[in-house]
Amino acid sequence: MLKKFLAEALPSFPADLKDWTLRSKQDFLRAFILAAALCVVFGIADALFYFQANDAFVYFRYVSNALKGWGYVWNPPPFAPVDGYTGFLWLVLLHGAAETGISIPAAADALTFLFSAGTLGLCFAFLKRMPMPENVRGKSFYVFLIVCFILLTNTTFAAFMSSGTEAALFNFLVLWWAYEASAADGNPIRMTICATLLACTRTEGIVFIPACLPFLILFQLERRTWKNAAFTALSLLPFVGFCFFLIWRKGFYGSFVPNSFTASFDGLFPPFAKDYLLSFAAGYGLYFWLPVLFLWMLMFCMFRRFKYFIIPTMLALPFVAYVAWLIVLTGGDALEYRFLGFFIPVCLLAGIRMITQNISATFRFLSICLGLYWICATPIPWTYAFLSRGLNTRTETAFWHKPVSNAFEWPFSDFWDAARKRLTSQGVALSRKEHEVLTNELLKSFPSRENGEKIKLKHSRLFAWSFVGVPAWVLPETYVIDLSGQNDPMIARLPVRDANKRKMGHDRAVPDGYLLCFNGGANLRVTPFDGKPDVSYLPSAPLTEAVVRGCEAFWRSRVKEKIAVPVRLKKPEKKAPSA
């Protein structure tokens, strides 16, 4: 049966992607075989790079609380709601999957792989629609296979096929937005819906909303009819929906700005932004596309075809704005290059378009260029991954960095080493291996979720730490104070300990009195990284609503006063013994 199935489908694999349709049974067979083969191959890569970041368990905590009926909150009442998650849309998708009975971590794994596969599907759709010279068009299927190979061997793409975070979803939505925006006769409603979803997935995604406006204006100017004007106006409705989302966020959490953003923000133009962006470009060979861009623009200028710059410029605007957002506001991310992963397929597809449009009309030249790009993009990240093999403890991986230039000399390897060293020392772009080991070590050191669920709200247990993802997941009804501030609205607004020695997301100066306010502080203790899932319980009084509300009100007022230094409680002086 299988032999007959393959015999019918395999010979029908056309080299021209335009011949790939779904009009017959044979069309469906070959599409199914291709999709299944890619899923198997990329599934193997996913298994090799599989990990769940500690940050993913932050999402899991919020979904768990929603399933328990408390809503998207970090701590159940009487604590005030806080939005410490990065992406609201990712939270909703996890919640929806969990409602079907799937465990939340398993749902995260399935969805990240699904959206990564969707990114491959969009690459297929891009190449199928892309205008190409006949010599290249006739072999466009092979171009797609080359693109798949480049993505398969890209360590960032492979890593974020898992991780449990919103990275794969965001990458998929960025490519989808570019696909809809670049369509000559596309539906602007799909474009604006996609932009709205991007803004709901990550704070930086909001740059895609204004990026839609030039396309909507152009769409209206091309067809000046009342019907088209109504259609354009209808395209603005998703933005209205986003405004309602912001109003809901303000009403529920008390702020338009996500607390996760506030916790990592400490002024404009963060010093690590340049290293974060340039090390990504150097490590993944994006500099290769600069001469291609120059030649592409030169050919347009030589033939004075300036009008052809309009659409590419409009497409580039949100990506330029995204980079500017990182330079001015965010700076980077603690989880390797999570914020930049979508640039790999975007630059790859843009490069193919530039080469085939203005530089060369031959498949051979395009293949050589893609091969050279792969050579530029592969050695540094793979060497770095190879150097981290065998590291399995927190002691070995905490703020780990090892120069790749010691293994071999490569263009920009010295620059990359220096930039990565500076980033690591500030807690930025920490390696995937470090996050993997951190999660594994925490899961070994804390009780299982099954045992952690035995601690109920009525027990009034409080736990405080900086790396709270796993602890908050395995202790679902324990009150958890996030000392990093990501899931605490007061700590997120405190000053950093030392502006000259940043540790991104883990450097807020928390006053001693903050924890002590909650009935004396933490009353549940766990020794992390000891490999023993043991818990010790300290004597405690019930954490009542009055205590929680009072502490929050007091420290909210202190934060508004912008306290400059942490409050240190002095130990009582010992009195001399009486005679």
Image (cartoon, rainbow, N blue to C red):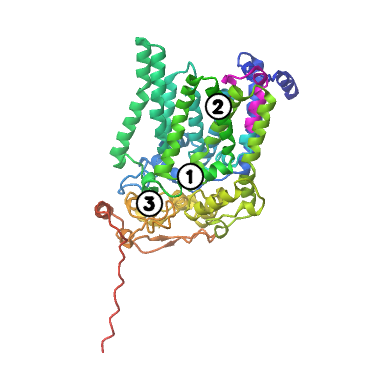
Tell me the CA gap for discs 1 and 2.
45 Å
Relative to 175, 525 lies left or right: left
The crowd level at tag 1 (other Cα within 10 Å; few <14, some 14-19, many 20+) is: many
The crowd level at tag 2 (other Cα within 10 Å; few <14, some 14-19, many 20+) is: some
Residue 374 percent location from the top left of the image: 64, 37
Identify residue for label 3.
485
Q: Residue at x 43, y 32 (%)?
A: 198
Q: Quadrant of the N terminus?
A: top right
In the image, is residue 351 above or below residue 222?
below
Relative to 210, 551 lies left or right: left
- Amino acid type indicated by mark 3: Gly
Identify residue for label 1.
56
- Is residue 129 within the magenta segment? yes
Q: Residue at x 70, y 18 (%)?
A: 12
Which is more N-terminal, label 2 or label 1?
1
Viewer-nearest of labels 3 and 2? 2
- Foreground of the two, 561 or 363: 363
Q: Quadrant of the C terminus?
A: bottom left
Query: Helix or strand or loop: what does disc 3 sit on?
Result: loop
- Is residue 286 within the magenta segment? no
- Amino acid type indicated by mark 1: Ala
Which secondary structure dominates the residues rendered in magenta?
helix
Identify residue for label 2.
298
Q: Which residue sits furthest front?
A: 302
Query: Helix or strand or loop: what does disc 1 sit on?
Result: helix
Relative to 421, 523 lies left or right: left
- Foreground of the two, 369 or 149: 369
Magenta-tinted stretch: 127-148
Residue 143 percent location from the top left of the image: 65, 26
Q: Residue at x 40, y 33 (%)?
A: 207
Can residue 114 be seen from the camera position used here? Answer: no
